[in-house]
Amino acid sequence: MSAQPTYLLLQALVSLAVVIGIIYLAYLGLRHLGRRQLGAGEEGPVRVIQARHLGGDRWLYLVAVGRRRLLVGGGPSGVQRIADLGETEEPDHADPAP
């Protein structure tokens, strides 16, 4: 006895919906994890304002320490301060406009 085509189609659609749901949950989880690693939403004197991938294992970070802004580079050899951009007149809790 063979299965009905309607049943097979329904089973395939349910399986597809489950796979799409798992992929979406993985996306949300990785997005949340990425924000936590960059310090988004954390309170305290040190915040990562912006991060840019430069290729390979190299990153460029704009970091706020209180009102002071630092440009920091990160790569396989470690983290290094590139420039001290001085103090800003913005309040500590405000991010610069995009």
Image (spheres, rainbow, N blue to C red):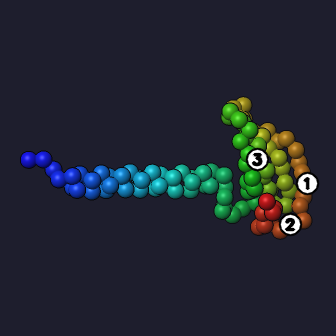
Q: Place residue 91 in its image quadrant.
A: bottom right
What x and y, as percent, mark residue 62? Answer: 79, 50
- Residue 70 spot, x, y in % from top left: 83, 50
Q: Which mark is residue 90?
A: 2
- Mark with earlier residue (3, 2): 3
Q: Nearer the viewer, residue 72 or 51?
A: 51
Q: Which mark is residue 86?
A: 1
Q: What residue do we see at 73% from left, 48% from top?
A: 51
Q: Residue furthest left?
A: 1
Q: What amino acid type should be assigned to the residue bearing mark 2? A: Glu
Quick check: 32 left or right of 80?
left
Q: Residue at x 56, y 56 (%)?
A: 32
Q: Please, what is the three-letter code of the amino acid marked with disc 1?
A: Gly
Q: Using residue 2 as the reference point, say whether residue 80 is left or right of it.
A: right
What amino acid is at disc 3? Answer: Tyr
> Disc 1 and disc 3: Cα gap in Å?
15 Å
Residue 97 position (above or below residue 60): below
